[in-house]
Amino acid sequence: MKRRDFLHRMTGAAIAAVLPRFSLGAGESHTEKLPNIILMMADDMGWGDPGYMGNRLIRTPHLDAMAAGGLRFNRFYAAAPVCSPTRGSCLTGRHPYRYGIFSANVGHLPPEEVTLAELLRSHGYTSGHFGKWHLGTLTCTEKDSNRGGPRGAKHYSPPWDNGFDVCFSTEAKVPTRNPMRKPGSHDPYGTAYWKTGGVKAAENLEGDDSRVIMDRVVPFIRDAVKRDRPFFAVIWFHTPHLPVVAGPEYLRMYLDVGEKERHYFGCITAMDAQIGRLRKELRDSGVAEDTMVWFCSDNGPEGKAGRAPGSAGPLRGRKRSLFEGGVRVPGLLEWHAKIKPGSLTDAPACTSDYLPTVLEVLGIDMPNDRPIDGVSLPLLEGRVTERPRPIAFESGRQLALIHNRYKLISLDSGKTWMLFDLVADPSESSDIAHDHPDIVQRMRATLEAWRKSCKDSLGGKDYRRTSR
């Protein structure tokens, strides 16, 4: 049974079964407006990079305003310390070790996975993906990006085959300015922007990449509003992933720092300007009140601390590390209809939580034939104090488990373990494993049970009900 048949079986009888406050009427009308959903994500932006986190160098006035106007997560986690796995978790609510996306440029989103885009589209939403995809190749016919073309055909899994109606997507990274050209030259970068159905974009590809992306998002939103359709928009910026290039108007804002920092700071401020443009568009279109706008990063900052411009703040580790600096990232939610301005939570949350949280808000049934790693965050009731289920991680030889106060971590596939009290020691400077062997033992057992579950999923056990 194909995925679309599974979706029909799962939701066909209950396609209008949403919470009373969001009940669907005949056709596409609804008695109370369904909230629009926007998932924004930066690429390699550190926990300490935004101004609202205390950064006094990088100017992010619109992210700061978003933080002031909504909910700020002090402990928001990417599901992985690298990009592709985190992106998979955003759409499936599941850890990507369950379906073979172990790292960047590895595996692809299988057709049996059920995405948030597919679930929402089944309930009347129009859906769009804009920016970096990184969950499979986008063409089988020509060389493109890291794996696209005949050599990567087995990993073909574009967003338009995973629930998205409108797409403007790249397989992987591009320069943050003039995205189709190698920095400092007119030579092609080797990556294309692909539109729905595999059509290559040919116009409006010059200048700041965040603006190029937002130029496609704004018409999508306007069209949805005009048609009175609730919309789901995934906006995955390339900023500030290498190659980092800022335009002259943003470089001029940072004349008192080195060239590397000028480009890094400048491209983040350029992205921030487009986030401001998006928020203004929502207000001007009259839908800001009814739109959930999420923001995070896919992992911690690139490079070595002290030498690279990205900041993890006081946190230990950076991109590719399961220490806090590699997976704790900026996290925001703005939703004027439900979230009080200036809200703050220290409760752990994760990119895997998007799917269960959105589905519970809408009253849509969760997929019940497979493990979901995320949890629904009790955001609306203002009771986000503790997490009911731990966040588990695996990346290469690294393993970790976070359960509210404590974090268990191994760097050698479980041969040795460290334990940290993240409330008292967010910088992970004092290993307390020897002082609390009972906690280590309990958390190890939980982590091993989770790893076994992931191996079962990877072996295809989750898909038995939907297989031929």
Image (tube, helix red, strand yellow):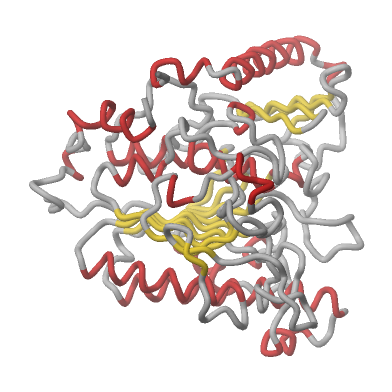
Quadrant of the rendered structure where residue 224 is? Answer: bottom left
Residue 306: x %, y % from top left: 91, 60
Q: Residue at x 80, y 30 (%)?
A: 398
Residue 252: x %, y % from top left: 73, 90
Residue 196: x %, y % from top left: 42, 60
Question: Dividing the image into 4 quarters, which one contains the C terminus?
Answer: top left
Q: How many marks?
A: 0
Quadrant of the rendered structure where residue 52 is? Answer: bottom right
| Residue 293 visible, this angle | no
- Lateral position of residue 407 relative to residue 52, left or right: right
Question: Dividing the image into 4 quarters, which one contains the N terminus?
Answer: top left
- Lateral position of residue 237 relative to residue 198, left or right: right
Quadrant of the rendered structure where residue 327 is? Answer: top right
Q: Residue at x 11, y 49 (%)?
A: 27
Q: Residue at x 78, y 48 (%)?
A: 319
Residue 438: x %, y % from top left: 75, 9
| Residue 112 visible, this angle | yes
Towards the viewer: 309 or 211: 211
Looking at this view, name the residue that lies furthest to the right: 307
Towards the viewer: 332 or 23: 23
Tell me if residue 43 comes above or below residue 380 in the rendering.
below
Q: Residue at x 29, y 41 (%)?
A: 362
